Image: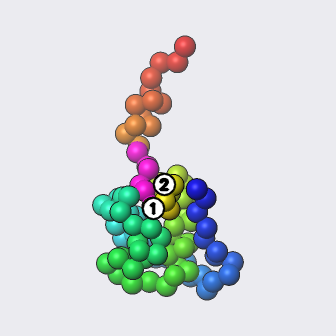
Amino acid sequence: MQMKFNIGKILVRSPRLETLIMVENFIKENSGNYKKTELFNKLPKKMMWGTFNVILEYLYSNNKIGLDKNGVIVWIYNPGLYAKFADRKRY
């Protein structure tokens, strides 16, 4: 499933680093529990919809989040797993 951001159609603001980290941590803690709108409404700190979409686009483009077949946002970033496979011997 492809995630839609609609950034060109809505008012967009650049997020602050603390806001990005807050959303990132919230998604990590609640991975697989919420769809996009539900996640937006459950965040501990309110923000504009456009800012939220910029953050999601950043996380999605950096392969930190993904969507399941039902549109639920899932945290997929795992540096430990990457390190395990990056260091293994190749034949």
| In the image: residue 17, left or right of residue 62 | left
Return the x and y of residue 60 as percentages of the image width and height.
Answer: 54, 59
Please tell me how crowded label 2 is: few (under 14), some (14-19), or many (20+) other residues with Cα within 10 Å: few
Residue 66 in sight from this viewpoint: no
In space, the residues marked 2 and 1 are separated at their CA atoms by 5 Å
- Is residue 47 shown to the viewer in this render? yes
Furthest-top residue in this view:
91
- Rendered residue at 68%/81% (across/down): 9
The kind of secondary structure element at disc 1 is loop
Q: Which mark is residue 2?
A: none
Residue 85 in the image: above or below residue 50: above
Q: Residue furthest right?
A: 8
Mark 1, Cα crowd under 10 Å, few <14 / some 14-19 / many 20+, is some
Q: Residue at x 41, y 55 (%)?
A: 75
Q: Which residue is mark 1?
A: 72
Residue 61 rendering spot, x and y as whole percentages? 58, 57
Which residue range is magenta in the image? Answer: 73-78
Percent x, y of residue 74: 43, 56
Residue 87, how many percent across, how many down? Answer: 44, 27
Residue found at x 51% / y 67%: 56
In the picture of the structure, the residue carrying the numbered disc 2 is 68
Q: Is residue 77 magenta?
A: yes
In the image, residue 82 sits, relative to residue 68, either above or below, namely: above
The local secondary structure at tag 2 comes to loop
What's the amino acid at mark 2? Asp
Quadrant of the rendering where the N terminus is positioned: bottom right
Residue placed most toward the observer, 75 or 70 = 70
The reply to whether the C-beta atoms of the residues labelled 2 and 1 are less than 8 Å apart is yes
Amino acid of disc 1: Val
Membership of 86 in magenta stretch: no
- In the picture, measured across the screen, residue 66 lies left or right of residue 21, that is right
